[in-house]
Image: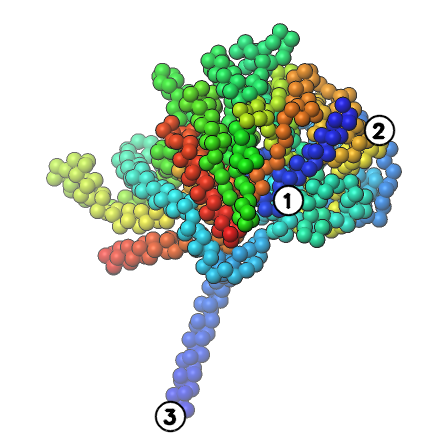
Amino acid sequence: MERTVTYRQSRRGGGKLTQHLSSWLIMLPSILLFAFFLWGPLAQGIVMSFFTTRNVSLDKFVGIGNYASIFKSQEFWQAFGNTVMYTVWSLVIGFLVPIAMALVIGETTRGKGFFRTASYVPNVLPGLAAIILYTAFFSAEETGVFNIILKWFGVERQSYLTEMGLVIPLIVIISTWKGAGATALIYMAGLSGINPELYEAATIDGAGIWKRVRHITMPAIFNLGSTLMILQIITVFQILYEPMVLTKGGPDNASLSLMYLMWRYAFGGRIEFGKAAAAGVIISLILLLFTLLYTRVNRRKNDWEG
Amino acid sequence: MKTRLLALAAALSILLAACASPSATTGNVPGSDPANDPSPSPATPPVEAPSELLEVDSEVIDADLTCTITAGNYPADTAPEAEIAVFDGYIDILKKQYPNVTVIPDYYHYTLDTYISRAVGGSAPTIFQPPFTDPPILIDQGLVADVHDALEQFELVDKFSESFIDMLSDDNGRLYGLPRDGYVMGLHLNLNLFEEAGLMNEDGTPMYPKTLQELAETGKIIKEKTGKAGLVFPASDSFGGWMFTCLAWNFGAVGENAMQYQDENGKWIINLTSDACVQALAYVKSLKWEYDILNADTTTSTWASCHTTLGTGEAAMNFAANDAVSNPTAGAGLAVDKFAMVPYPAGPAGAYALTGGTAYMFAPDTTTDQAVAALALLKINGLLPFVTESTEAGMRAAQAALRDRGGPVLPPVPAWDDEEFVAKQREISEEYSNVDMRLYNDYFNSLADGSITLKGEEPMLTQDFYREITRAVQAVIVREDRDPLAALQSAQDNFQAYIDDQLGQ
């Protein structure tokens, strides 16, 4: 009997192994790719953050020296504050625009396909090309595109990216212009899932467009909106090339972001990859908090749906 | 004149190297070539090499040297065909002299941020051209090759001045590169705007500003008469600080008022709150808020964009050096007879001008054979201190190409103090000259007669120092109510903390 049990357990175990083996084999390419491109560099970055470096090689162990140096630096806190402001402005400007676009395009009866495609076109442009395009638009010189337009209406030329109070909102507007169409498509997909009978019933009951949006559309996309908001915060927190190309972090560091500061540690002067790695770890920890929040929201959403 | 030039060359070689102490730092250094296109090697265009190079009798020098090198700074596909043909002509001669050497042209133009990844990833060109601020950190970080043996094979080591050996060698005295040429800061002028503003003498020379006060007043006249900026001023990234230090020297931030100095205990002290620095920053502020002569995009302007602004007639003056005269002309379309270069305007405390230059260095995996082949290519270019038939032809071809594409052919500011070589460079530049030297004589005379004091860059963590000062410069440019002393105090406190942290002092 004992033998039989052992045999059965063994067979059962072997069966599981065979079953698991095929699963592991299916996952293996992904695991290898993740290990090589993600987990390996991630672990190396964490290790590097505790060392000084000679180009990209580890030199001397300095414990939390790189972290202490970063936290002592006024630039870090300025960049942190700016990054928070990027996030706040992106919520003020960038969060509602795609929803509005989705609603307007959704309500459009003619040319919906055209507007849907047109809203997505900026997203197709290479990021740097779009940013460089905007340097011509926001130039404070007479040759700046917006200043030329203002001149048609007799308005004096204006400064844009050289204004400390304007620079972050303008960068967010540019980013929104580029990315809103893609997000709007996701909202449109969400909106298409709403049962049209609800709208018909509401209309019969005398609900206008605002009431339909408020009582049917908004609740329907609330969970989707929560998820996209957290993803947006995570993305905007990593803003890099927009300030790098448009303003180089200026004026007076008014547009310096955490990611750009990290880039500067590595490539901008002293070639301090250890310090850059430490900055990367700090940013990752902040983003981890947001990710946990995202997971929590997502789980709550699934619970509701479940 | 020849003696004065040689004396100048010797003095320059010391000063140029002094601008990059072992502790100097790097970055997208003002004065370096701005283009950076990491595209793969270009196809050879079907344009015949210039006659100067075709006439060279190229005998085989070393048939045993077998290697492949990549040569950076190959002109872009959009460059004039003549310019590409010159580069190809050099390569053709090298192939004749060293039949088993293969040269792969590379568009790459050095900047520190792009070079690091290339060097570590093994795709840096065999030879590239960093500015003088960068060799110490490239050597310190192990990002360049030791080419001492190749330099010895070429009998170049003995031709180095001591100051260049200090800049381009490690602690063991091994050399990692060689100087290309030098520059001295002056003032570039767009004569179209000077004419429009009525600021030309009867003999066709400009009424240019000789002092910083005159610069502000001249700029104001130009702004009022033409509506264009009197002065284009780069104040983005680290450029604003770079510009500021030279201004501050002229206000007296030298000697006991130096911006960086070591105290009696050897500790490095940052001194940006001296009267000289405060006056200099107040001067920059006045250019914006009192005289209103600066370009509107000052805080996003770079060294490269300033040349375009001047060349396209959007500004009349630009603080720039002799190594960049082709940028506003050949690069941005300003006719060569509408361009002038004059000495850096003097300040209330003297006349100082920044001096620097460009080096040749080699990718970290370069072998001695590859370094020898790269040096052979430089020799054919006429860039090494040798005077032979082929080097002379190389010099002629370069000057002819520059003249053909509309850049001013000017006397050199040499990095080598070899008498015969400097004399030949000068002779050839005169032969191919396409400019009215009256528009440049004051600049070159000021270097030769010592009426302007040449000064290397601030020694410690230079690019980081510039970046910190740039914040103060930007602050007074974008905010009329920003106090220069307060802005400089903030920069001083921040950078003192940074340098203490970096040096552990």
Q: Chain of mark 2?
A: B
Decide which of B218, B105 is in the foreground and name it.
B218
Side of A262 where B386 appears, left or right:
right
First in sequence: mark 1 or mark 2? 2
Residue displayed at 84% across by 48% down: B64
Of the numbered discs in the image, which one, if any, rests on residue B157? none
Amino acid at the residue labelled 2: Glu
Q: Are marks 1 and 2 on the same chain?
A: yes
Coloring applied to the structure: rainbow
Question: Where's residue B99, x and y in %?
Answer: 82, 43
Q: Chain of mark 3?
A: A
For label 1, the residue is B135
* Mark 2 Cα shell of 10 Å, populated few (<14), some (14-19), many (≥20): few
Side of A11 where B2 appears, left or right:
right
Give SS at disc 3: loop
Task: Check if mark 1's residue and mark 3's residue have beta carbons within 8 Å.
Answer: no
Residue displayed at 38% across by 16% down: A152
Amino acid at the residue labelled 3: Met
For label 2, the residue is B55
Question: Where's residue B52, x and y in %?
Answer: 80, 27
Residue displayed at 32% across by 49% down: A230
Give SS at disc 2: loop
* Mark 1 Cα shell of 10 Å, populated few (<14), some (14-19), many (≥20): many
Question: Where's residue A90, x and y in %?
Answer: 33, 41
* Mark 3 Cα shell of 10 Å, populated few (<14), some (14-19), many (≥20): few
Q: Chain of mark 1?
A: B
Nearest-to-viewer mark from 1 and 2: 1
Of the numbered discs in the image, which one, if any, rests on residue A1? 3
Question: Where's residue A82, x and y in %?
Answer: 37, 42
